[in-house]
Image (tube, helix red, strand yellow):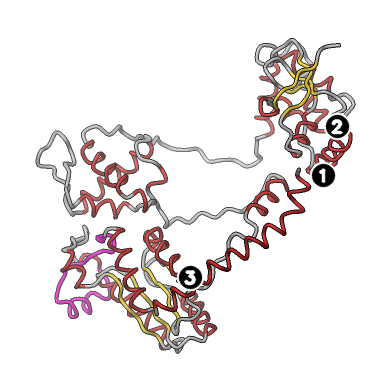
Amino acid sequence: MRKLTLVSISELNESAENSYLYDPPSDSEIEQLAESIKTKGLLEPIIITKDRYIISGHRRIAACRLLEKESVRCKVLPITYRNNRKRFVKLLREANLQRIKKVNEFIQEGLVDDSDKNISENLLIEKVRGSLVDIESFKIEGEKKRFQIKGNRPLLDAALRIIDELRDYWALSDRQIHYKLLNDPPLKNKNDPTSVYRNDAASYRLLTNILTRGRLFELIPWEAIADDTRPFVSWNVYNNTSLFIKEQLDGFMKDYHRNFLQSQPNWIEIIAEKLTLGSIIRPVAMKYHIPYTIGRGYSSINPRHDLAVRFEGSGKVKLICLILSDLDPDGDEIAQSFARSMRDDFHANICPIKVALTWEQINTLKLPTSPDRKASSKKSSNLSKYLRKHNSDDIWELEALSPQQLQKILDESVRGVINTALFNQEMQNEKGERMELNRYREQALKPFQTERR
């Protein structure tokens, strides 16, 4: 009888052929097998190749992993998976002769019956065959060519320095990088000493192109730049119940947050004009547990209705809205329109505050104008009102503020509308509550921890 070897479970590998030929066992099957191994031990050794690929015992190994065993007894056959795939697959089939199989498993086994054919090729052909769809796709026309970044390297390098400097605020918008570049404008083309980056539409178009190519050529981390104007929706699904249970147990009673604003006399919310501000607003809003709404321009009626319901349900005295919008014809009117609707449509006792942008911030911080340059270029229905109010045709965007500046402004605004002593007391209360919850969590998880051992 071949001598058995004690092998670490972490060293064992499952072959691609096994994954393809045989459907994975259900969680209940593995749990039953694990209970049997826990009671009776591992009655049959695992059969493996010299390079640690499993021939027989895939389900037993899964059960041993569930039991958190570190090593198992193995019978090591004198072949390697890498150098003798044909022999390996035949042994794999022989090891599964006694199994009750599904029809698709019998069909897939048939692919390896012809010893004159290349096994890997058969498996690949069948996978491709299974991927075919019964709907006609359209022909892709033309070709998308992206040229390497050579002459524009000074602009790319300057953008990379900014991206690294603002790492804590990822994902950034192209607009934020544009305004930072204006602090120390680089050359747009290294071969043209007059091609200084400017606050104009042509420079901005070139920047967006460079940032796109930089990511495609893996010079810029993909996650560093955002495009929140194209939302993506997916579903929180799991491959099996084990992953779900582990996630639920790991997070059990860990996500408690006390309502820091419950003792405040007023209801406070943040309203922002642009989706690209999300990563900047979120840390401040989270710090105080303030709800925030981010739109694309004018808010529809639904967010305003939902805010009115929250305010009414709170029983607070005033609704304080901290509003962030551009200083341009539409940005001005967005703040006015929102406040007007909350007052007149929903009868809220609203106190609207324009947190940014304001004339004071523009003058104090000497912010650059928008690359679109003039209010008259935007063809807004609010243009004449803007010109009368500000006596200026210049416009400014929120992105002209650095992330640090905007966060500081927002934080100071929040501090200006809350009772700090009440807020600090709520934070202190949360610390004691978290300690109490940890004790409850430890008691609740004891049965699971005992069972897993």
Bounds of the magenta segment: 379-401
Q: Nearer the viewer, mark 1 or mark 2?
A: 2
Q: Secondary structure at mark 1?
A: helix
Pointer 2 or 3: first along the chain: 2
Residue 438 within the segment the image draws in magenta: no
Q: Kindly indicate whether the residue at mark 3 contacts the one at mark 1 (C-beta within 8 angstroms).
A: no
Q: Answer few, some or many: residues within 10 Å of disc 1's Cα (few below 14, many 20 plus, some between 14 and 19).
A: few
Residue at image point 49% right, 70% down: 428
Q: Quadrant of residue 114?
A: top right
Which residue was labeled with disc 3?
427
Report, in whole angstroms, how far the alpha carbon at label 1 lies from the one at label 2: 19 Å
Q: Which mark is residue 28?
A: 1
Q: Where 137 falls versus 344 (above or below)?
A: above
Q: Quadrant of residue 277?
A: bottom left
Residue 65, horizontal then vertical, whole percent: 73, 36
Q: Where 403 falls versus 211 (above or below)?
A: below
Q: Where 376 falls versus 388 (above or below)?
A: above
Q: Which mark is residue 41?
A: 2
Tag 3: residue type?
Answer: Met
Q: Kindly indicate whether the residue at mark 2 contacts the one at mark 1 (C-beta within 8 angstroms).
A: no
Tag 1: residue type?
Answer: Ser
Where the N terminus falls, by quadrant? top right
